[in-house]
Image (cartoon, rainbow, N blue to C red):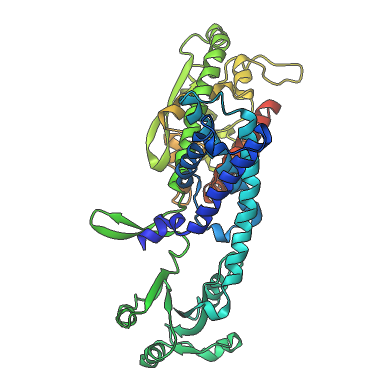
């Protein structure tokens, strides 16, 4: 079972062969468009190129989600998956060409043509293959499945088994109720329904059954004897608990096979790509920080002599404490004055601290014609320049470019269990909260809801969208305070 979960992409060999074919066909067409119709596989200057493309393509597969749930993806999800696959493959291939000093013979135009043609061909062939799979699973070729569950979960189970995004490899032939409910309540299902007893075992024993699916309700005991009997008959048994059915995987812990649950599982390959993007973004961000330092540091020191950088202990992923770095935008006694200003906190219950016209900000006593503070500290915060040193935290691995806001230790101490979910992900410089109103949001529960949505729906695509929105928010000076 563990192999099926962790190596699902390996089962879709048909999609793998199609991808290989499409990339080679795209390379051939791209070569012809640049050099005319000839055989690149016999050309000494070009014949190594398809081999490099093939190796890079196979190396990339596990890190872009592979073929996990590929048959259930809708067309738009497939478009995004193919584009990501094409771009990452071409980027890796170009890097290899450059490292072996062969980039001159592989023009950027040819790579662009190859990438575009590959994305188009791959999308077409993947969608056609999925249609082939759906059409091939006719009723007479499907596996006979018996569902074992409780009356309270029965309709839910059937709805999920027949979900619109699932491929029907089976036909539901019989239902066994674990709680002894009256089968006549489900007469509308037009299906044999029996209580879990010796007769149910005899029925399964003497009928066409390929597999049994046991969906155990939380309030009932594990049906060990019943499952032992089924396995003793040589029948494949699929098991799920109603509490764990949406977020459980089988893993190895020491010498034990364990059922591992998490708020959300993320593919290891995508997490590796996210970390690679963080490292690149961290280096670029540190360069901008160094440039900003030349202008910001003298202005801060003139108005408030002291350290240019501000370091504060924050709570990161899973409660790990780390030091966050910022350009200092407040006077040196800001932390001591925070307690006396709590009455003016805009955030309910004091779970975070945000206030209008914070007097602790450097130069905030200076006002513009509208009465708004216009000191150097306000400028740094309104333009988000104070956040730039956090790229150091990104390089160190304490933070990510996109994530959740790391709380202070005193805020963390006030968290209820439902709030802690926001820290099951690595904190970020920006996130859903920052691009959804930031200082305009005064309800901490709304902050938690935004962070929960981000974690539940995380993808590289969502990170990219948040980064683009962050740029727009910063340029418009929206939400900062």
Residue 83 occupies quadrant: top right
Residue at image position (52%, 47%) is: 455
Nearer to the camera, 381 or 431: 431
Residue at image position (58%, 10%) is: 295
Nearer to the camera, 37 or 429: 37
For the C terminus, the image quarter is top right
Residue 374 occupies quadrant: top right
With respect to residue 147, does 281 lie above or below?
above
With respect to residue 293, does 155 lie above or below?
below
With respect to residue 141, does 96 lie above or below?
above
- Compared across the picture, whether 288 is left or right of 30 comes to left
- Kindly tell me whether residue 324 is visible in this rendering: no
Expressed as whole percent of the image width and height from the top left, the position of residue 269 reads 45, 44
Residue 155 occupies quadrant: bottom right
Expressed as whole percent of the image width and height from the top left, the position of residue 445 reads 56, 47
Expressed as whole percent of the image width and height from the top left, the position of residue 108 reads 62, 28
For the N terminus, the image quarter is bottom left
């Amino acid at each position: 079972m563990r192999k099926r979960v962790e190596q699902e992409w390996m089962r879709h060999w048909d999609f793998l062969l199609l991808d290989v074919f499409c990339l080679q066909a795209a390379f051939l067409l791209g070569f012809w468009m640049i050099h005319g119709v000839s055989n690149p596989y016999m050309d000494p200057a070009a014949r190594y190129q398809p081999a490099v493309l093939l190796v890079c393509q196979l190396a990339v597969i596990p890190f872009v989600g592979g073929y996990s749930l590929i048959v259930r993806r809708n067309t738009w999800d497939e478009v995004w998956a193919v584009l990501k696959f094409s771009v990452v493959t071409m980027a890796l291939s170009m890097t290899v060409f450059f490292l072996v000093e062969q980039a001159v013979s592989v023009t950027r135009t040819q790579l662009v043509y190859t990438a575009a043609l590959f994305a188009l061909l791959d999308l077409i062939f993947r969608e056609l293959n999925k249609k082939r799979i759906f059409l091939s699973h006719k009723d007479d070729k499907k596996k006979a499945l018996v569902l074992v569950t409780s009356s309270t979960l029965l309709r839910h189970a059937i709805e999920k088994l027949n979900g619109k995004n699932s491929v029907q490899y089976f036909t539901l032939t019989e239902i066994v109720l674990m709680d002894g409910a009256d089968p006549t309540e489900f007469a509308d299902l037009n299906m044999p329904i029996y209580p879990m007893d010796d007769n149910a075992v005899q029925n399964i024993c003497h009928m066409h059954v390929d597999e049994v699916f046991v969906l155990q309700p939380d309030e009932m005991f594990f049906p060990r004897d019943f499952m032992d009997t089924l396995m003793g008959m040589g029948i494949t048994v699929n098991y799920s608990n109603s509490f764990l059915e949406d977020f459980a995987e089988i893993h190895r812990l020491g010498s034990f096979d364990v059922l591992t649950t998490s708020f959300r599982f993320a593919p290891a390959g995508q997490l590796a790509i996210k970390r690679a993007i963080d490292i690149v973004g961290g280096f670029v961000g540190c360069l901008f920080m160094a440039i900003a330092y030349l202008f910001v540091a003298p202005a801060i020191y003139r108005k408030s002599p002291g350290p240019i950088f501000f370091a504060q202990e924050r709570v990161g992923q899973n409660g790990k404490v780390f030091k966050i770095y910022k350009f200092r935008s407040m006077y040196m006694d800001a932390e001591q004055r925070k307690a006396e200003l709590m009455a003016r906190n805009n955030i309910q219950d004091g779970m975070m601290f945000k206030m209008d016209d914070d007097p602790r900000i450097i130069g905030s006593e200076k006002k513009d014609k509208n009465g708004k503070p216009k000191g150097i500290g306000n400028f740094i915060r309104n333009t988000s320049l104070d956040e730039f040193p956090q790229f150091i935290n990104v390089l160190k691995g304490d933070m990510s470019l996109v994530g959740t806001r790391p709380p202070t230790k005193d805020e963390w101490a006030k968290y209820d269990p439902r709030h802690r979910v926001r820290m099951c992900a690595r904190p970020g410089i920006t996130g859903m909260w920052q691009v959804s109103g930031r200082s305009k949001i005064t309800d901490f529960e709304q902050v938690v809801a935004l962070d929960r949505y981000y974690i539940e729906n995380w993808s590289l695509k969502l990170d990219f969208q948040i980064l683009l929105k962050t740029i727009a928010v910063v340029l418009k000076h929206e939400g900062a305070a």
